[in-house]
Amino acid sequence: MALLTVGSVAFDAIETPFGKTDKIIGGAGTYIALSASYFTADQKIVSVVGEDFPKETLDDLTNRGISIEGIQIKKGEKTFFWSGKYHNDMNSRDTLVTELNVLEKFDPVIPERYQGVDFLMLGNLAPAVQRQVIERLKTRPKLIAMDTMNFWMDIAWNDLMETIKLVDVLIINDEEARQMSKEYSLVKAAKKIMSFGPKYLIIKKGEHGALLFGPNKVFFAPALPLEEVFDPTGAGDTFAGGFIGFLARTGDVSFENMKRAVIAGSAMASFCVEKFGTERLMNLHEEEITNRIMDFRSLVDYQMEKVI
Ligand code: AMP
C-alpha cells in the first residue's frame, strides 16, 4: 500500500567517541524513507532541500523506488544542517548546530499524484507543518503516525496538541513522553498522552527497547544487545521507517500486526547504529533483515516449566 513520508532531508555532521564526520547525508525524512523502502515499493516523500544538495542522493532515492516529486529544490538556498556530539555513553548527545535554512519557511506541497495514499509518516518537523500536510490530503490515510521532539514541546506546545489530536500513532522517546505528560511512570505517561488524541503510542527507550501502548494493551520489544554501536543518529527515524513500512507492506493496522511492526522497526534501528550516518541502511539485503528479525525472536523466546 502507498506510503507518504514527510521529514527533513539534510546534511549532518556527527561526532561520537569513535570518530567524526564532515557534512554527510542525514535528515529524519531520509532515514525514514530508506528504512521503509525495504518493506514497501510504493513510497513517496515530501521535503525541501537547497541547491547545494547532491543530485546523486536524490537519484539514489529514486532508484530505491521512492518518488521524490514532492522534494522541493530551492534555488540559491541552503539545505537544513544539523550537527551533534555524543557523550561517552552514546545515549545522550548535545546539538552543536541547527541551521534551519530551507526548513525555516517550509511550505509542504503535495503533488496531485500523491493524493490517496494509505499511510502517512510525519517525521520530526514543526507541528504546524505536520498538520498542514494532513490538511492538504484530500482523503484521510488509513493510518497516520507522527514523531516529535522536546524542542517543539518547549516552543510550540499548542500547535503540537492540535496536531497530535489528528494522528493515530505517536512515536516518541521516554524522556519526551515524561516531558509531554509530566508523569514519571511511563504507564501513567502513556495513559495521559493517549488522552490527548492518539489511539496508539510508541515509547522508545534506546538500547532498552520500545513499548507499544494501545487501548488497554501493552507490548514490549527489546533492543538487540549489539557489540558495537558507532553512531545512534537516525535510529529513531529508522525505527519509525521500519514500523510504518511494515504496516504499509501488510496493510493490517491491528494491534497484533503493530507488534510485528515494532519488531521490524527495532531490527532496522539495530542496523542503523552499526555505521556512521545512513551508510548501513544503503545496502542491506533482505536476508539480513529477516535474520535479524529472527534474532529478536530468539532473544525473548524461552520455555519454562512450573518451578514452584
Ligand atoms: P534522531 O537521531 O532520530 O533524533 O534523528 C536525527 C536526524 O534528525 C538528523 O539526521 C537530523 O538531520 C534531523 N534533525 C535534527 N533536528 C531536526 C529538526 N529540528 N527538524 C528536522 N530534522 C531534524
Image: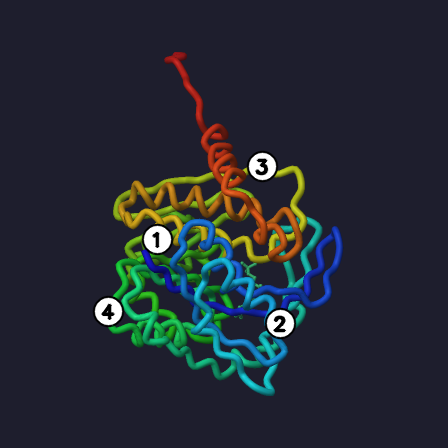
Name the N-terminal-most of marks 3 and 1.
Answer: 3
The quarter of the image that holds ligand 1 is: bottom right
Q: Pick the quarter of the image with the C terminus.
A: top left
- Left or right placement of residue 286 versus residue 15 in this view: left
For the residues marked 3 and 4, what is the alpha-carbon distance in whole angstroms? Answer: 41 Å
Q: N-terminal of the two: label 3 or label 4?
A: 4
* Closer mark to the observer between disc 1 and disc 2: 2
Give the residue pinned by disc 2: 54
Q: Quick one: label 2 or label 3, which is nearer the N terminus?
A: 2
Task: Measuring from the top left, give residue 261's x and y in whole percent.
Answer: 39, 45
Residue visible at 38% across and 64% down in the picture: 4
Instruction: Tell me which numbered mark, 1 or 2, is placed earlier along the sequence.
Output: 2
Quick one: label 4 or label 2, which is nearer the N terminus?
2
Distance between the alpha carbons at the discs numbered 3 and 1 = 28 Å
In the picture of the structure, the residue carrying the numbered disc 1 is: 248
Of the pair 287 and 192, the residue shown nearer to us? 287
Residue 139 is marked as 4
Residue type (three-letter) at the residue carrying disc 1 = Ala
Q: Residue at x 49, y 53 (%)?
A: 35
